[in-house]
Image (cartoon, rainbow, N blue to C red):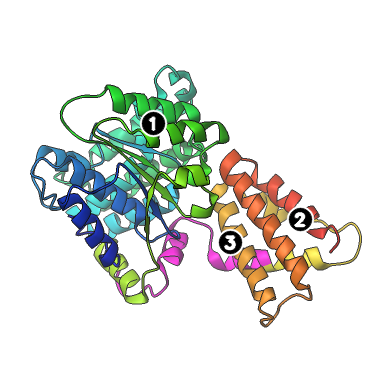
Amino acid sequence: MFENIIGQDRLVERLRGEIAEGALPRALLFHGEAYRGKMSAALELARALTCLERDALWSCRCRSCEMQRLLVHPYTLLLGSRYFSEEIAAAADALSRTRREPAQFLYARSVRKLLRRFDPVLWERNEGELKGVRGAIEEAEDLLAGLLPGRLLPGEGELKTTLGRCAELCEKIARAVSSGISIDQIRRATFWARSTSGGSNKVIILEAVDRTLEGARNALLKAIEEPPEGAFFVLVTTRKSAIAPTILSRLRAYHFPARGEAEERGVLEKIFREPEGFRGSLKEYFQSRGGPKAGSLRAAAASFLGSVLRTEPGSRPDEELLAALSGQTELRGFLEELTLELRGALGGGAGAPPAGLGRIERWARLVRQAAAQGESYNQSPSLLVESLYYRMREGA
């Protein structure tokens, strides 16, 4: 079990030991920066907890593991937002290059991580909200069916067309995923966990749980205080500090530390079958496949900060930047780069703007607030950044 989790050996051994000893808590928190394997470990934990053979080797042929490998197990629910498009693009690239079964699993799982956010359990009595994407979900599932492990892949041209169409559909579907977990989803998942029977453990994975909407936090707290029999809650976050202390006190935390360069290279080679030509980090790899480019965002952040510091009246944020911030992925990347610019200024590095310590700290606080607003309330990225610009200029 956990054979596909690279570079987190100590944490994996801890989880294996707790499972073997029957000491695994019913509410867990996987936390750490992005691209450290938190969601992969959560999915592997779900497979280990539902394996009929109990050893949960990746090669296990039990029916439960077969379903978990393809992310169709009925006793696992996925909630919350994620960098869906970048991951799907990276997996599609691996499938196009290698045309092998491991890449078929990788691609199927990347798409299903998105599609399982629309599990009927989570949308019961609210099916009307899915009207705009139901057709896209069904078409994506039909296309995916022809690419699953064990299926003979179509020719190069047809495969490219299929992957391109699936990417278009997934972009549309991903826009329908709320950036915050709602109270209805928490309540439905908890009710499902209490009412579902069948002798198997049930696993509820809440990704980006720090973005849980305010009204849902009490429902989540109640759920993890007294988890239903046989139910495990796995909360995943990159911002542990943004989770309410009352919720944190009910969780056992598992920190995912940064991987070393060799370990990140191992992920690229073993999981994404990437040849040695790419020498960047995992973050840069995903951004190069489907997300905003780090270089352009870094330049935009530097330009934005320089504009904030201009003293002439009437200065405005760059219109091209505002237009480019079309989604939460772009907003998150831009604010990350802006934070790095501020850290550089704080350290007095080359190119640091002439701003005092107090001012930089105030700006950093405003950037964090903008990030929280974008993630928790799904506000317009361009309006958030425009508002941030003027707030930073106050007293600049």
Q: Position of residue 140 (x, y in %)?
A: 34, 36
Image quadrant where residue 11 sits: bottom left
Is the residue under label 2 in contact with that under label 1 (CB below 8 Å)? no
Look at 74% across and 72% down and name the residue there: 357
Look at 64% across and 47% down and name the residue there: 381
- Residue 336 is labelled as 3
The residue beneath circle 2 is 389
Judge whether residue 276 is colored magenta.
yes
Q: Position of residue 308 (x, y in %)?
A: 79, 63
Q: Which residues are magenta?
A: 273-301
Q: Is residue 87 left or right of residue 394?
A: left
Q: Is residue 1 left or right of residue 334?
A: left
Going from N to C along the chain, the mark reached first, 2 or 3, is 3
Which residue is farthest top? 125
Examine the rendered structure and indicate whether residue 393 appears above or below residue 140: below
Q: Position of residue 352 (x, y in %)?
A: 71, 77
The residue beneath circle 1 is 118
Q: For label 2, count other residues whose C-alpha is less than 10 Å away and answer few (under 14), some (14-19) or many (20+).
A: many
Q: Secondary structure at mark 2?
A: helix
